[in-house]
Image (spheres, rainbow, N blue to C red):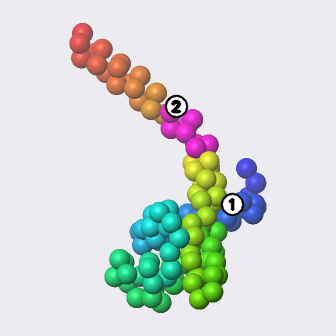
Amino acid sequence: MSARLRPSDLDLDLVFGALADATRRRILARLAEGSATVNELVAPSGLSQPTVSQHLKVLEAAGLVTRGRQAKYRPVRLNAQPLATAAQWIGDYRRCWDESLDQLEAFVKTLQQKEDQ
């Protein structure tokens, strides 16, 4: 593996960094239901408008949300593509997890057979 970061590595860093915060994950969950204004995101969170706006800036930098403009209405929308990229990256390691679990299962069966003897 190269020591140099590829652009996709930097994108994943931003996505995982954005997802590391529970408030941002709640904002994404809300946006999965449909677009919302900043004020609509503020209401259920109990956070101030500037705090929610800061979280949205992080999500926007990671490409997880986009902001539109419709007259005075500025809807925030979920962009799920970076989540799909992150899920694919995690999925690439599934084989490793499955192999580890298979080895653990074999070890437990061996221990159970020894106990039964």
Q: Are marks 1 and 2 in contact (CB under 8 Å)?
A: no
The residue stretch that appears in magenta? 91-99
- Tell me what residue is drawn at x 47 percent, y 63 percent: 33
Indicate whether 109 appears above or below 39.
above
In this orientation, which residue lies closer to the viewer: 1 or 43? Answer: 43
Q: Main secondary structure of the magenta part?
A: helix
- Tell me what residue is drawn at x 35 percent, y 77 percent: 44
Can you give x and y, in whole percent of width and height, for residue 99 in the image? 52, 31
Can you give x and y, in whole percent of width and height, for residue 102 in the image? 46, 27
Q: Using a 10 Å C-alpha cutoff, classify the residue at mark 1 as few (fewer than 14 neighbours), some (14 to 19) or many (20 or more).
A: few
Can you give x and y, in whole percent of width and height, for residue 57 in the image? 58, 80
Task: Compare marks 1 and 2 and give the one earlier in the sequence.
Answer: 1
Indicate whether 105 appears above or below 45.
above
Q: Residue furthest left?
A: 116
Q: Secondary structure at mark 1?
A: helix
Amino acid type shown at disc 2:
Glu
Quadrant of the rendering where the C terminus is positioned: top left
- Tell me what residue is drawn at x 75 percent, y 60 percent: 6
Q: Quadrant of residue 74?
A: bottom right
Q: Of the numbered discs in the image, which one, if any, rests on residue 9?
A: 1
Q: Secondary structure at mark 2?
A: helix
In this orientation, which residue lies closer to the viewer: 77 or 7? Answer: 77
Write down the residue under mark 2.
99
- Residue 14 appears in the rendering: no
Amino acid type shown at disc 1:
Asp
Can you give x and y, in whole percent of width and height, for residue 64 in the image? 59, 67
In this orientation, which residue lies closer to the viewer: 23 or 76? Answer: 76
Please check the rendered image and state whether residue 94 is part of the magenta-colored stretch, yes or no: yes
Indicate whether 43 appears above or below 102.
below
